[in-house]
């Protein structure tokens, strides 16, 4: 019996080893598949985050481009209108062009207020205040309601400052987009 028990015990150990080996192999395979799935999931999340970042950057770039173009066009029409007033021509047609540019600018400004970071928004505010000041003086001059100090020379100085403000704003936008490095003024 000792040999029968020993044979039975050897058979049980052999079957147990075979089953245990299959179970361990299955567990290692499951762990390997789980690790692979987690790695793929991390890669997918990283790719999605990179796509979202690029999409956000492109949206910001579009807002910057459109706002910059609208502000430059608005300032240029204000400048043209100042020339019309200085020469003494009828300002109605020129004023209509200013109003059209102003409407587009205001729309772009509203969008910029909701999307640009605070550092750039400070420059957007500076540009907006300057444009508003020029517009106010020109509107009063056009409607013969000028205040003390409202004259074409004041407007010319403010327009020159407006171009400087636009350049500074554009530089800040380019820095924010990573196109240029920050200047150390």
Image: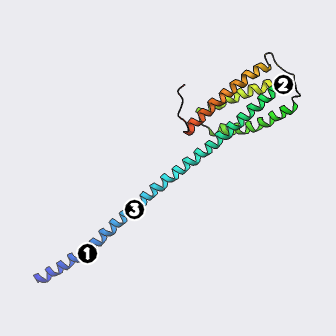
- Specify whether 158 is left or right of 2: right
Q: What element carries label 1?
A: helix
Q: What element carries label 3?
A: helix
Label 1 crowding class (10 Å Cα cut-off): few <14, some 14-19, many 20+?
few
| Distance Cα–Cα, label 3 vs label 2 | 76 Å
Q: Which label was assigned to residue 18?
A: 1
| Residue corresponding to mark 2 | 85
Q: Which label was assigned to residue 6?
A: none
Q: Are marks 1 and 2 in contact (CB under 8 Å)?
A: no
62 and 41: which is toward the camera: 62
Residue 63, image x and y in percent?
Answer: 65, 41
| Residue corresponding to mark 3 | 34
Q: In which quarter of the image is residue 150?
A: top right
| Distance Cα–Cα, label 1 vs label 2 | 100 Å
| Distance Cα–Cα, label 1 vs label 3 | 24 Å
Q: Who comes first in sequence, dot 1 or dot 3? A: 1
Residue reaching furthest to the top? 148
Q: Who comes first in sequence, dot 3 or dot 2? A: 3
Q: Residue at x 24, y 77 (%)?
A: 15
48 and 61: which is toward the camera: 61
Q: Nearer the viewer, mark 3 or mark 2?
A: 2
Quadrant where the image shows the N terminus? bottom left
Q: Nearer the viewer, mark 1 or mark 2?
A: 2
Colour logic: rainbow
Q: What element carries label 2?
A: helix
Q: Residue at x 71, y 26 (%)?
A: 130
Q: Is residue 163 above or below residue 60?
A: above
Q: Is residue 165 above or below residue 47?
A: above
């Amino acid at each position: 019996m000792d040999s029968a028990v020993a044979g039975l015990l050897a058979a049980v150990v052999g079957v147990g080893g075979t089953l245990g080996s299959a179970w361990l192999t299955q567990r290692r395979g499951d762990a390997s598949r789980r690790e692979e799935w987690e790695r793929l999931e991390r890669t997918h999340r990283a790719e999605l985050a990179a796509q979202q970042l690029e999409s956000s950057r492109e949206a910001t770039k579009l807002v910057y481009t459109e706002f910059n173009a609208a502000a430059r066009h608005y300032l240029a029409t204000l400048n043209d209108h100042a020339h019309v007033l200085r020469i003494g021509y009828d300002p109605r047609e020129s004023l209509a062009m200013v109003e059209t540019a102003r409407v587009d600018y205001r729309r772009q400004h509203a969008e910029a207020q909701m999307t640009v970071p605070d550092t750039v928004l400070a420059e957007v505010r500076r540009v907006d205040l300057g444009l508003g000041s020029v517009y106010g003086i020109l509107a009063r001059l056009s409607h013969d309601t000028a205040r003390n100090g409202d004259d074409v020379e004041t407007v010319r100085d403010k327009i020159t400052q407006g171009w400087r403000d636009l350049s500074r704003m554009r530089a800040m936008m380019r820095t924010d987009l990573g196109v240029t490095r920050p200047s150390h003024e």
